[in-house]
Amino acid sequence: MRYMTSLRFIDVVAREGSIRKAADKLAITSTALNRRILAIEDELGQPLFERLPSGVRLNTAGELFIQHVRSQFAELARVQSQISDLTGIRRGHVRIASGADALRLFLPQAVSQYRSLHPAVTFALQRCYGESAEARLQSLDADIALIFAPIRAAHVHVAATVRQTMHCVMPDDHPLSQHEMIRIRDLAGHKLCLPTSESGIRQLLDTGLLRRATEIDVVLESDSFEFMQNYLRFENALGFQIPIALTELAEMGLVAIPLDPADVAPGTLHLCHLKGRVLPVAAAKFLDEIITSLRDNYGEAVDQ
Amino acid sequence: MRYMTSLRFIDVVAREGSIRKAADKLAITSTALNRRILAIEDELGQPLFERLPSGVRLNTAGELFIQHVRSQFAELARVQSQISDLTGIRRGHVRIASGADALRLFLPQAVSQYRSLHPAVTFALQRCYGESAEARLQSLDADIALIFAPIRAAHVHVAATVRQTMHCVMPDDHPLSQHEMIRIRDLAGHKLCLPTSESGIRQLLDTGLLRRATEIDVVLESDSFEFMQNYLRFENALGFQIPIALTELAEMGLVAIPLDPADVAPGTLHLCHLKGRVLPVAAAKFLDEIITSLRDNYGEAVDQ
DNA sequence: TTCGCGCGATGCGTTTTTTGCATCGGGAAG
DNA sequence: CTTCCCGATGCAAAAAACGCATCGCGCGAA
């Protein structure tokens, strides 16, 4: 929308921390951008940015204002999607922040299924860890977040939760592959692949491993589940995963065996959005879909 | 704010129901205004107005959009007031929709007291009856409403309520002036002045009078309490009022005597704002003030 | 300390956008 | 059928936004 140009510009400046960089990104000259910002500050009656030698930074008023600007964008998107819905064709754009877990299989399936019903709805999927997912909700860069970690921020509303028991993934000829359940002490002497420490899986594992004080042999750390899963086959090592991220293992010659919940506490997957925000039609309906889907596939999804 | 010009224009067109009338009001030509509207409709991808021979009218999409536009105005005002508050001086503008009752004494006192603390805050007081007060909250033309009538709309949030017993006002030499409490049957044979039928007072009275089927003698109807109060002295008639509207009667040679609650049910005064809306700082603080004031002066104010 | 670099601010001529005037076509009322 | 008022549109003038060149300023490297 044309009338929001200045607001969009301000948003970019705030993100870039520099008028010249932002102008570059926006494909205009820094003078034009600078003047737009001065004009808005003038209209508001007070500055929004501190001028530093290295660029600009939002001051307190700016922080308040930028939040308002972003909520206007989100509101406009919502109204547009609502208006489009009047024609019978659902349009819109849904932005999802998710950990790598759900991006493997669950979200691809869910998005694909939704898009087969509403082809005019587009999606953006942002991979990120818990805290940054919460931040994206707040800054209105994401509509929905799927977080496998405790919720920290008060501004996040949890629409549904699913309990996920930790699983151990290994080649089907691995010595532990015949176990029905794996204890921490079983891991001793085996080679382990762990996700990086930002991951919710890793945090749960760390807690469990620490408590049992087992000697463990970590041969690899990665933030790519796909890499790790492929790697296991060559090194005959052990990986960890939660059910929602378990893809077709059999075809790859892998098996997944649950860890004893007494050793590693089951984690909780949270489906969230920003508290107090009215989601666009498309996002709201998609949220409903995945709540249903979570409940059907992983049981015990809880509306809150 | 300059960037909202088009939105402001659309709002006026929607209210006026005609591009030419709106253009006149906005002191621009109808062509310029027309093109702005066409431009926005073009950007949105669909029309907001139906073109009638006599002007324009919002269609469904337009209704959705105009609500969004108005909420943006309100939001901007809120953010501006919040930013001003950073400087330590509270600024802002509070718009109150109220029945005539509270406009007599209570609100003048409350506003005056608040302005003595925060002289940079300005006020607008709109006199209106219950339903239209609710409509003003919805269309964001008012921040706060003080309604002496049942709340009808679901979008209204009641921040506090006060029970108000109906009183009968009369010259101090009136035959009924020595009663401690007045029954409906006492009214027979006396001349009555009633508020117009939109008034909450009148509605309560009608219910009571109807139930008792008393023969009554209505000599005057008016929507001006001030007129009626002055009139009583000359005609030696009876008027009706609720405590919040009772001004210095003694000086005018008048007395107020409660009606028996068994005959005329006490009404409820509601202090409201739009549900889900974040009020500007000034309005929110003023709301707090009058909740306190209501509780102190009329007891039993109830936060909800 | 000096020099160079990158930053935001500003004066001025140019380009783009917006506005106003005149006018068209069409429905409603007299 | 005529008249009036409505919104839409072509075109020229006015206004706003833009880009270029340049200034002043603080920081970091030499």
Image (cartoon, coloured by chain):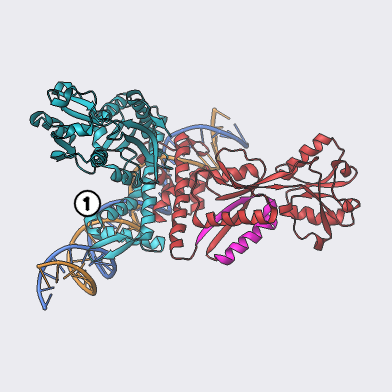
Chain colours: A red, B cyan, C orange, D blue
Picture quarter with the C terminus of chain A = top right
> What crowding class fits label 1: few (fewer than 14 Cα within 10 Å), some (14-19), or many (20 or more)?
some
Q: Residue at x 91, y 44 (%)?
A: A189
Residue A233 place in picture, x, y as percent? 84, 57
What chain does mark 1 sit on? B
Give left or right: position of A160 versus B44. right
Give left or right: position of A72 versus B133. right
Task: Say which element carries label 1.
Answer: helix
Q: From the image, tell me which residue sits under label 1.
A: B25
Q: Magenta segment range?
A: A91-118
Q: Amino acid at mark 1?
A: Lys
Residue that protrudes farthest toward the left in the picture: B234
Q: Residue at x 91, y 52 (%)?
A: A175
Q: Residue at x 61, y 60 (%)?
A: A111
Give left or right: position of B71 versus A105. left
Dominant secondary structure of the residues highlighted in magenta in the image:
helix
Residue D16, placed above or below residue A118? above
Picture quarter with the N terminus of chain A = bottom left
